[in-house]
Amino acid sequence: MPDIASLNTRPNLPHRLDAAPLLDLLARAQMLLHRDPNRADLCLDQLRDLLRQGTDADDGAVMLARRPDSHCSPPTGGLAGWQLRKVTAYVETRLGRTLVTEELALVASLSPGHFCRAFKVSMGETPHAYVIRQRIRRAQRLMLETGHSLSDIASACGLTDQAHLTRLFKRLVGTTPLSWRRTWQGSPLAAQA
């Protein structure tokens, strides 16, 4: 690996980030994607943080932010691996109906308060935010894989109606479901789904 100081091409600017750690995080996330999606998410979150914290606004160059965790391991104080797998599988199979924190805490064999704290440490977001994100991911898959109406998709994802889907979708994705569907439905990625 080249010396970090030699990567700095402009004086008075922080050192440029070597691409190797970024590529390493990306490769780990790809490897973990199907085997352990939660650890893959952690790797991708670290990659995003590195890029977000290390971008020079003037020229868009990635600057040195912090070194990535070499194992993409969850921080201490979170859920045990079996608890995390059990809760995420439970959420995945029940996205079409109402899910409450107390129910998820029972799955993890913890009190609701302890569960919420441990879940946030492990996943970086509250259980409610995680469930909403999973509902939107399922909605995206259904929009690409089926011709169902947005109202039917909202119902299949456990949301009250199309307006609820649109509100959450726009908040998380940045565009409306209809616009997103039109953009991505004909893409090669949609054919692979």
Image: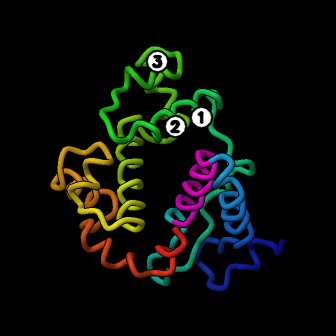
Q: Image height check: is 129 above or below 86?
A: below
Q: Residue at x 50, y 75 (%)?
A: 191
> What secondary structure characterizes most of the magenta part?
helix
Q: Amino acid at mark 1?
A: Arg
Residue 90 spot, x, y in % from top left:
49, 33
Question: Gap in Å between the C-alphas at discs 3 and 2?
Answer: 13 Å
Q: Residue at x 24, y 61 (%)?
A: 150
Circle 1 sits in a helix, a strand or a loop, which is it?
helix
Question: Gap in Å between the C-alphas at discs 1 and 2?
Answer: 5 Å
Q: Amino acid at mark 3?
A: Leu
Mark 3 or mark 2, which has the lower sequence index?
Answer: 2
- Residue, disc 2: 88
- Marks 3 and 1: in contact by CB < 8 Å? no
110 part of magenta stretch: no
- Residue, disc 3: 106
Question: Gap in Å between the C-alphas at discs 1 and 3?
Answer: 14 Å
Q: How is the image coloured?
A: rainbow
- Residue, disc 1: 85
Residue 168 spot, x, y in % from top left:
26, 53
45 part of magenta stretch: yes
Q: Quadrant of residue 29?
A: bottom right
Q: Is residue 96 left or right of residue 120?
A: left
- Marks 2 and 1: in contact by CB < 8 Å? yes
What range is drawn magenta here? 37-51
